[in-house]
Amino acid sequence: MKKILIISDGAIGHHFIERVIGTYTSENLYYVVEVKGSGFGGFNPARFKFFEFDPTSYYKIANLLKMDFSQVILAMDNPIDLEHTIKNIRLIKPALRIIALDLWNSKNGDEDIEWVNMHELIAANLIDYLPNIPILAQNIGLGSGEIMEVLVPFGSSFVYRHIGSIEQKNWKIAAIYRNRALIIPSDNKMIQPNDSLVLVGDPAVLRSVYRAIKRELGQFPAPFGSKLYLYIDMAIERASTIMPLVRRSVYIQKKLKKPLIIKVLNPGDIDVLRMIKASAQGEVKIDIEYDSNGSLSIISDDIKRYHIGLVLVSQSIFSRKSIRKKLYSSHVPVLKLAERSFSGLKESVVILDEENHIEHISTTVFDVVSQFGFNLELIDYQAVRGSTKKRLSTISIIYRRSSPNRSVSAVKIKIRSDC
């Protein structure tokens, strides 16, 4: 969540804050400084923090700027107060991005400040009333949200996907801006990180699309579900293998930071059952089925009841064809646990057998490896007219993601293509 500082002193700033309070996004945290409090209502206390003091005071603004803000917006009526506020900010945070409202058509040589010139904005709106004049992008539409520009973050589910693979119902990608250049969309164009997409469509649909684009990695097992599920049948598992399964599942739960349901069927070993129950701490819950009657419907019922997004099973369980069929029909990812320690894994491999199949699983793959800190190798085998000729290409990509505690994780990705 990004922290944004708004410093307001005047009618325009007051209206701006009202508009911000009415926005639908919940991704930002706003700190609002006013010389005189305006008593805003209807805001979410979790998203807005209001302060009342003179921003030209170095001591007071310095205390607030001890926090890390992504940017500061200045909407002030007095040019002298604005000048001193900027000086104070620059003394404390020389590199902080500043967006300042310019009411006086002033000339300022500071290239690190983005000036919003009120005279230009008014002229741009007035020109709409002239005949035979092309309308600029910022002036198109009804102003109700049917046109939207979205910056695509690296971890988005839209990254490295062709436009033709994205279902666009009641909305369209109208333009792509990359490196300050316009790209006309087509089905074979691929979206890259930091692209700006111009979207056109129903406002309600666009708000949903906006949230989908901005949703970064760290969500798995979503969208399949919200919980993890370890399936243990004590009539099948050897007693000596059960607790290692539990420990590996708890390790995975801590990595993915999602609740874990441990399902135990046919509990016949009291000592093992007691140890399993001892693992039920935090977001780990135990569900014991004393009378299963061998019914595999328990799996599908639990997936729906608990909203399971990842099923964990042992080799013994996965070797049963009837269980594999039930898991396959559930349309939920399955992780088969080996006898080796899961915490020692550092590498991961994905083998593809369909052309462009990577676009359908890329978000899930990148999400999983980023959360576990694995290196990833994608191997794409494609048969071309029965030929055994092989072509190998390797692409190295470094993916960086800021975690909530501001640490940075990196995933090294290799793509091999043999055809």
Image: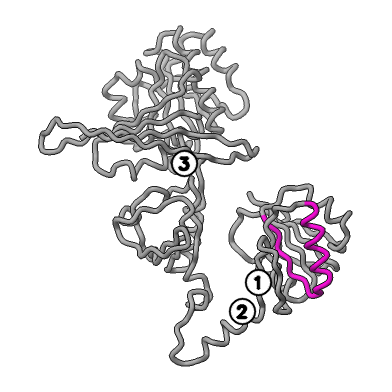
Residues marked 2 and 1 touching at CB (< 8 Å): yes
Residue at image x 66%, y 78%?
118
What secondary structure is marked by label 2?
helix
Percent across and percent down for residue 394 are: 33, 34
2 or 1: tag closer to the N-terminus: 1
Report the residue marked by disc 1: 116
Percent across and percent down for residue 321 are: 26, 23
Q: Nearer the viewer, mark 2 or mark 3?
A: 2
2 or 3: tag closer to the N-terminus: 2
Foreground pick, 255 / 75: 75
Percent across and percent down for residue 390 are: 20, 31
Report the residue marked by disc 3: 222
The residue at the far bottom in this view is 131
Report the residue marked by disc 2: 121
Q: CA distance from mark 3 to mark 1?
A: 40 Å
Mark 1, other Cα within 10 Å: few <14 / some 14–19 / many ≥20: some
Residue at image x 37%, y 13%?
236
Q: Amino acid at mark 3?
A: Ala
Q: Which residues are magenta?
A: 71-92
State yes or no: residue 281 in magenta. no
